[in-house]
Amino acid sequence: MAKKEFTFSDLNKTLTSLNEVGGIMEDNDFSEINSFTSMGNYVLNACISGDIFGGMPNNRSMSVAGDSGTGKTFLALNLTREWVNDGYNVIYYDTENAVDEETMSKFGIDTSKVRYEPVDTVFRFKHLVKKTTTKIREAKEDGYEVPKVAMVLDSLGNLATVKEHEDAEEGENKVDMTRAKQLKSTFRIMTMELARLKIPLFITNHTYASMSLYGKP
């Protein structure tokens, strides 16, 4: 007696009922890049996307790091301008009090398309991003047409933790061992949801030390 066949197609239907964003790769656009936004620099465009006319993908999170004064905020503002020109509304998370309306205007940015968010802690940043993505996702699920949104965090290295603030308030001088865990938690929560909603995130970060090939700074 021939056995009944349980095909991969049958399994796929079951898995789809468990995870609606999963599916056969040729039909699944979850991780598909639909467009690129120029970084304002042909070399960077080519390095990131393999095309001098490419640039930042519309559903990826990307970080650049460098010493103080190497132009990280310059890149963030260039990208903000190009995003706005591409029809995005940008949420700019500033941890350094580094930009203002005048600065953005000098970069040719339509500041009416930018929401400025000063943030000082990892928790505050995580909370704001999570609330934003939840609101957009719920609006889409309710049938609303949602705006194109992009995000900048300038910079990651300057985000403190609640514990650091509490220690400062109490006059304590302790090493905060929670920060790394909080940052990992933040990006575990954010990354897939941002990709799902096609919200690109550009992050700047500091480097504080470097090593040459010969082991000398």
Image: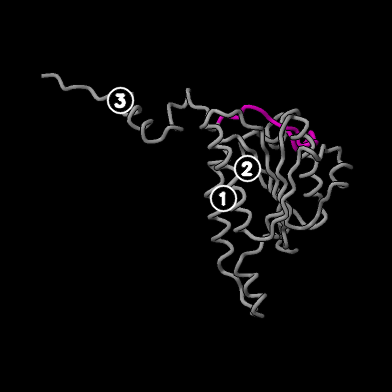
Asked if 4 appears above or below 180 in the picture, the reply is above
Q: Position of residue 127 (x, y in %)?
A: 59, 53
Q: Answer yes or no: do the residues labelled 3 and 1 have beta carbons within 8 Å?
A: no
Circle 3: element type: helix
Q: Position of residue 104 (x, y in %)?
A: 84, 44
Marks 1,2: beta carbons within 8 A: yes
**Residue 55 picture location, percent across and down:** 71, 34
Q: Residue furthest bottom?
A: 171
When asked about the image quadrant of residue 96, the answer is bottom right
As shown in the figure, which amino acid type bears the numbered disc 3?
Asp
Residue closer to the observer: 54 or 97: 97
State the quadrant of the N terminus: top left
Q: Quadrant of the C terminus?
A: bottom right
Residue that numbered label 2 is attached to: 61
Q: Which mark is residue 81?
A: none
Query: Residue drawn 58% across and 42% down?
Result: 133
Residue 91, quarter of the rendered image: top right
Q: Earlier in the sequence, mark 3 or mark 1?
A: 3
Query: In this figure, which residue is indicated by the disc labeled 1?
Result: 187
Residue at disc 2, secondary structure: strand
Please name the residue that numbered disc 3 is placed on: 10
Residue interval drawn in magenta: 32-45
What amino acid type should be assigned to the residue bearing mark 2? Ser
Most distant residue in the top direction: 2
Q: Mark 2, residues whose alpha carbon is within 10 Å: few (<14), some, or many (≥20)?
A: many
